[in-house]
Image (spheres, rainbow, N blue to C red):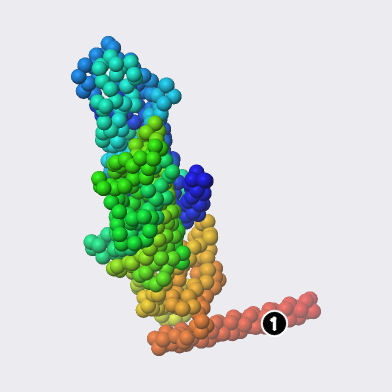
Amino acid sequence: MRKLQLATMLLILCAYVGKAQVKDISFTISPAAEYTWWDDKSGLEDNVLVGGKLGFGFGEFIELRGIYLQSLDQKTDFSNFGITDFNPSLFNTQKVSVSRYGGEFKANIGTKGVKPYFTLGAGVQNIDLDTNEDFEQVYATLGLGVKFNITNRIVFALEAKNTTYKFNSGVALLSSEDKASFGVTDANFNSERLSNWSAQGSLQFYLGGRKPGTLSDLDKAYLQNFKGGFKGIKWVIEPSLAYVDFTGESLYKDTYMLGGYAGLDLNEYIGIRAFYFQATENEEISTNFDNMAMYGGEFRARLNDGNGVIPFLTLGGGYISTSNNYVSAPNVNGLLTNVEGGEFATGGLGLNIPLGKHVLITAAARAMITSGENAKDITTTDDIQTHIFYNAGIKFSLGKKSKAPSSVNTENLERELTAQDDKNHIKIEQLKKEYQSNINTLNNDLKAAYETKDIEKAVEILEEKKQVVASLKEVKEVEKIQVKTVKQQVTSVTPVVSTSKEVNTKKIVTAPIQLEEKSKLIKMTPVEFESLIERILKNLDNENLEPAKIEDDKSIQTKSSTIEQDKKIEELNTRVNLLEQLLLQLNSKKQTEKDKNSELINKINDLNKEDNKKQ
């Protein structure tokens, strides 16, 4: 039944993580190897473990990984254990297999060059003898490493790691023959806290999500929250009621517990908690407390952006503390025994249900793993025990709400648009000056053509001037859009994504410039703006392309030109009329000359006819 509960929890967890990955989470896979310098009291020789890690990256800075490592040709070693009558020549070396599986939290620091990181992890270590005996312990790890980018999605990492666990290696790993040879018994050994150091190398592959070294929306949310100290971080308090369903083989009694969590929400997705719970007596909800407490810490990862019901996953660990007055569950012989405290690791799934802006109902179910030293049957000592920890409570959030990645992305986009507006304004002013200078030059040339009665030159100048004036008018229309955009109050910014794979510099893509219904924010993509500027710069206005249409809720109508433009148009019309008169005069003159020529030809023909008659 308990295995079914764990399997169900794992399936739900994978489903939610898979859903979250589509949005903003990457998948990682890492083959790894490490060399371990075992504690002298471990009874193991220094050796290599190999395996790998599978996990999820929450942006650039935060990762959660599952770990599996397996030893290669591992043997026992008691040469430095401290046994008084130890004799290496009498020691019978045994082959053992050491494996570890668990979870690990990884925090990356920096995005460029050699990037340091640290890890926190917990899990289960299994030591399997060739005599078919095996022993399991809960372990915890702390690591510090650096990583190097090989390619955009392949990273090489080196890490120094410390692993700690509690184990009675003298009783478990010394054979009966060795104990007899060295004159020791099980009473000479105790369960001890052991600590090992190791050097680990791994090759990490990032699949999906953002590339290593780049910042996702989630990363920008992290950085935004840490600017100015703790201004962007929410403080959280969660008073809670818990119930622990200890496995039937444990000496711990099933119990209700009162306590809670306190910690930080770094953003809409990531949180850190410390917790403390005190057991109550007689498996009842009351303020009569028993002599057992639990405390520790955990990492939380929410699987959506904080809207509606919020699923989250947890990974953590802690310590069960009991006093000498704690009354245990009876052992297999029906006797009450002294129960020592011990470490545990937890992992599970929970839900937050909002009641208000800063108040939520929170509930979760966690698998809690302990070593089997506190077992009813001492013959199963060192077997891992799995318990279920349930809790429900109220979550209070204090301080300014953490910014969601979407809002951080909006702010960044606004800054980019402002910078682009400044660049556009400079380009527009430059173009206006250039076109106005061209118009002034053409006016002077046109005046000279009028004075010299060079009609063909005047027509050529007027055609060129017509194009330049049209281009200047289009630049001023773009300027109006820029000014209006700056003056409007931006309530939301949504980037317009162009589906064109390439921009044709000979033909402008005149996609409509749209207005949002609420904010009336005019949106033009950089590609559209650059295409418009490029068209003007390359004098491509003679391709009879219609200017971009501008529409909003009130259907903006084209307004009359300014007084200065009216004067210029009037002056242009006058000059066109004058040009038409000159053209008429020219045509009339040509017609007169043609008539005179016709009359002269007729006269010559008449004279020829008369001469012929005389002959």
Looking at the picture, how far across and down is residue 156, in whole percent?
A: 35, 37
Instruction: Judge whether 499 appears above or below 447 on screen.
Output: above
Between 279 and 471, which is closer to the camera in this rendering? 279
Instruction: Judge whether 309 appears above or below 114 on screen.
Output: below
Q: Secondary structure at mark 1?
A: helix
Between 68 and 512, which is closer to the camera in this rendering? 68
Q: Could you say which quadrant of the image residue 199 lies in?
A: top left
Between 533 and 455, which is closer to the camera in this rendering? 533
Q: What residue did someone put label 1 on?
A: 603
Looking at the picture, how far across and down is residue 502, in whole percent?
A: 51, 57
Give the residue at x 30% y 54%. Answer: 290
Between 418 and 507, which is closer to the camera in this rendering? 418
Whether residue 12 is visible here, answered yes or no, is yes
Q: Name the side, left or right, on which 469 lies relative to 229.
A: right
Instruction: Judge whether 68 appears above or below 90 on screen.
Output: below
Whether residue 301 is visible here, answered yes or no, is no
Q: Could you say which quadrant of the image residue 265 lies in?
A: bottom left
Give the residue at x 54% y 70%. Answer: 545
Give the residue at x 30% y 67%. Answer: 398
Quadrant location, the C terminus: bottom right
Looking at the picture, how far across and down is residue 288, in whole percent?
A: 30, 59
| Mark 1 crowdedness (10 Å alpha carbons): few <14, some 14-19, many ≥20 | few
Looking at the picture, how far across and down is residue 449, in whole percent?
A: 44, 78
How many discs mark residues in the rendered view? 1
Amino acid type, label 1: Lys
Give the residue at x 32% y 66%. Answer: 397
